[in-house]
């Protein structure tokens, strides 16, 4: 009888330890959950986004999948550390705008704009909009209903191997469930 009780205590202890460790690892995403004033900030680190019809779900800010089933080549999607917060769908709830990087299926590192938008019950990821290839993101902001993504790019005649040095900004509005460039 003592052995059964001891075995049950060990199993329960392991289960509790597993859930504590798992919960701690999900908090190490770099995506803020609370701002400097202690207000809620939607965390997109485990959201699902769509890239040209392909659905990608992040886990702790990252997703990796084989380019071809069984292949050693992996395509990764990463949540970058650039965020902006505000109500972009006019429902009175704060949304998160973010940048995602995708690489591994070719020679580029493709940067996308996406949102983690409030809905009637929960938040959801949006369709991702391509910003540029091998650019250096600088900032993302919301002001007056306009979303601005600033980054460094190259001159039109420069090779992708050249370091991005040209300041560029793209502006978007969130309308009818998607981003539209201005």
Image (cartoon, rainbow, N blue to C red):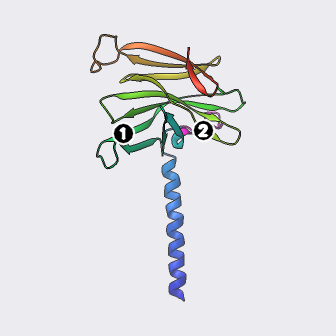
Residue 66 position in % (x across, y down) = 35, 45
Any magenta on residue 92? no
Any magenta on residue 42? yes
Residue 25 position in % (x across, y down) = 48, 50
Q: In front: 80, or 118?
A: 118
Taking the image as drawn, is residue 29 in sight? no
Q: Residue at x 49, y 57 (%)?
A: 21
Identify the element where label 1 is drawn: strand
Q: Quadrant of residue 152?
A: top left
Q: Which residues are magenta?
A: 32-44
Quadrant assignment for the C terminus: top right
Residue 73 position in % (x across, y down) = 30, 42
Taking the image as drawn, is residue 17 in sight? yes
Q: Is residue 101 left or right of residue 140?
A: left
**Are dots 2 and 1 in contact, CB under 8 Å?**
no
Residue indicated by mark 1: 75
Q: In front: 164, or 14?
A: 164
Q: Main secondary structure of the magenta part?
A: loop
Q: Quadrant of residue 159?
A: top left
Identify the element where label 2 is drawn: strand
Residue indicated by mark 2: 124
């Amino acid at each position: 009888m003592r052995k059964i009780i001891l075995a049950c205590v060990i199993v329960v202890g392991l289960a509790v330890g597993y859930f504590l460790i798992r919960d701690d690892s999900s908090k190490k995403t770099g995506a803020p959950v609370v701002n400097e004033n202690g207000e809620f900030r939607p965390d997109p680190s485990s959201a699902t986004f769509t890239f040209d019809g392909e659905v990608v779900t992040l886990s702790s800010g990252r997703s990796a999948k084989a380019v071809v089933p069984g292949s050693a080549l992996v395509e990764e999607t990463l949540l970058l550390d650039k965020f902006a917060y505000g109500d972009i769908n006019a429902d009175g709830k704060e949304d998160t705008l973010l940048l995602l990087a995708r690489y591994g299926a070719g020679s580029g590192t493709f940067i996308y704009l996406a949102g983690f938008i409030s809905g009637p019950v929960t938040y959801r990821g949006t369709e991702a909009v391509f910003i540029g290839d091998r650019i250096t993101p600088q900032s993302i902001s919301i002001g007056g209903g306009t979303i601005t993504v600033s980054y460094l790019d190259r001159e039109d005649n420069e090779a992708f191997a050249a370091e991005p040095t040209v300041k560029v900004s793209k502006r978007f509005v969130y309308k009818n469930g998607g981003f539209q460039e201005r």
